[in-house]
């Protein structure tokens, strides 16, 4: 296996009309699998070029994270000539990814029906906030709003506190991976049927599916999930605990794990209290168990507890920040860091996509492109060729 080994999508062309996270991530995944990805940006570029924790210093971490190995061209889809250029590009494409509000691409003449009439082998992936049906179909949506609407915020946070958003942008990221999965399934089906398909993915659907068990409980039993803070309601003891010098996760709810944990905790009250005898008992009496367990765990350092719990094969973990995680031995062993440079020598370090394959490596990565830097390569060597709509 080498970085030059054939990849599954070598020779395929992906057009990425999307911005921010979900669509660009989906296109990037296909690029990691070998596809050539052309990013079609509005005149001011993908909005992610201006997003980030520190937008004033020129650093584009959000954009860099989801747009490596792409070529950028600017097309103003409000301009008839640029729309025709974009439509002509779809004739030779294998996959189109777009994430506009429902109906926008159809009104521009670049929707699934128009493009797949011209190119029956095209796989058209459309990402929306709420899907194409229902009262919210025409609404836009971002990760935090979808967290609110899909029930995630209602189950996140302390029981007596306000609903809390999940950290970072998990709904956007998960939607990107689902969209890539859909594109791959449609490409496989095309190999059998000779025709492409339209793949529709919404942030709302993905967000609901990510906590499917809560919906199963409600739809089947009428149970409404509630906030339980750092301690899951269904398993005890499991959660986040303070130690003498920090915080850690301990999940010792299975009978054999609890028995082993008792030996390590070495506390007679925990061992002998009949309220904690069985797994069911511990769930029923969690209000009594958790404070007592917390008192015991404060007696030693995180490292001490982790050494003993790991040796006993009891699930546990150190609560780390991003720097701690990135500097850890596990992060290094997993080769998650991906260092990239461009032709100007600019460098940036990002994180690789998680799937690994025995038959090929993702290979060398190019930084996210400068705005419109791929115009000549994508549209042709001369301005005359580009003006005529000739696509190389």
Image: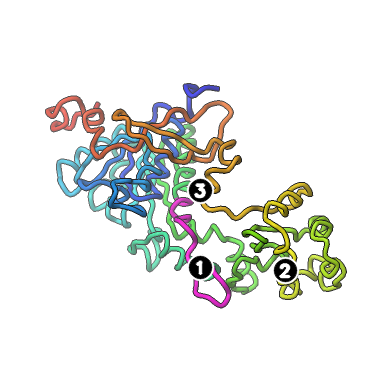
> Where's residue 25, x and y in %?
41, 44
Q: Is residue 161 visible?
A: yes
Which label sits on residue 81? none
Q: Secondary structure at mark 3?
A: helix
Whether 293 is among the magenta residues is no
Sort mark 1 into few (<14), some (14-19) or many (20+) by Cα contacts within 10 Å: some
Q: Are marks 1 and 3 in contact (CB under 8 Å)?
A: no
Mark 1 — residue? 151
Provide the residue designation for mark 3: 323
Magenta stretch: helix, strand or loop mostly: loop
Q: Position of residue 214 (x, y in %)?
A: 60, 65
Give x and y (percent) for residue 174: 48, 51
What are the residue bounds of the magenta stretch? Answer: 157-175
Residue shown at 65% from the left, 65% from the top:
232
Mark 2 or 1, closer to the camera: 2
How far apart are the alpha carbons under marks 2 and 1? Answer: 33 Å
Quadrant of the image for the N terminus?
top right
Q: Where 284 falls versus 48 (above or below)?
A: below
Q: Quadrant of residue 243?
A: bottom right
Marks 1/3: CA–CA distance? 30 Å
Q: Calculate the distance from the C-alpha at mark 2 to the C-alpha at mark 3.
A: 29 Å
Q: Name the element at disc 1.
A: loop
| The one of 98 and 51 positioned closer to us in this rendering | 51
Tell me where residue 349 sits by quadrant. Answer: top left
């Amino acid at each position: 296996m080498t970085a030059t080994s054939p990849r599954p999508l070598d020779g395929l062309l992906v057009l990425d009309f999307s911005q921010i996270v979900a669509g660009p991530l989906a296109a990037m995944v296909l690029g990691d699998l070998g596809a050539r990805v052309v990013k079609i940006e509005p005149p001011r570029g993908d909005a992610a070029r201006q997003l980030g924790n520190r937008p004033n210093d020129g650093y584009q971490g959000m954009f860099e994270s989801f747009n490596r190995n792409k070529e950028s061209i600017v097309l103003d889809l409000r301009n008839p000539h640029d729309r025709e250029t974009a439509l002509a590009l779809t004739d030779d494409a294998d996959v189109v990814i777009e994430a506009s509000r429902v109906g926008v691409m159809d009104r521009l003449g670049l929707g699934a029906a128009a493009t797949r009439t011209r190119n029956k082998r095209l796989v058209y992936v459309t990402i929306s906030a709420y899907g194409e049906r229902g009262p919210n179909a025409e609404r836009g949506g971002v990760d935090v709003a979808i967290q609110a609407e899909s029930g995630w915020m209602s189950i996140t946070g302390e029981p007596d506190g306000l609903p809390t958003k999940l950290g970072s942008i998990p709904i956007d990221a998960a939607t990107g991976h689902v969209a890539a999965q859909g594109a791959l399934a449609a490409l496989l089906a095309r190999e059998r049927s000779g025709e492409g398909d339209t793949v529709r993915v919404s942030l709302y659907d993905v967000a609901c599916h990510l906590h499917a068990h809560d919906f199963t409980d409600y739809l089947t039993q009428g149970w409404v999930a509630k906030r339980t803070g750092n301690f899951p309601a269904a398993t005890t003891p499991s959660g986040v605990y303070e130690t003498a010098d920090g915080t850690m996760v301990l999940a010792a709810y299975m009978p054999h794990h609890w028995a082993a944990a008792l030996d390590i905790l070495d506390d007679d009250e925990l061992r002998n209290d009949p309220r904690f005898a069985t797994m069911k008992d511990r769930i029923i009496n969690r209000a009594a168990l958790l404070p007592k367990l917390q008192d015991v765990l404060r007696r030693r350092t995180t490292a001490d507890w982790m050494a003993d719990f790991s040796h006993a094969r009891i699930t546990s973990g150190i609560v780390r920040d991003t720097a701690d995680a990135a500097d850890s031995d596990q992060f290094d062993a997993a080769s998650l860091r991906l260092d990239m440079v461009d032709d100007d020598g600019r460098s940036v370090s990002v994180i690789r996509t998680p799937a690994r394959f025995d038959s090929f490596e993702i290979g060398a990565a190019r930084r996210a492109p400068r705005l419109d830097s791929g115009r000549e390569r994508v549209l042709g060597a001369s301005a005359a060729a580009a003006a005529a709509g000739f696509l190389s």
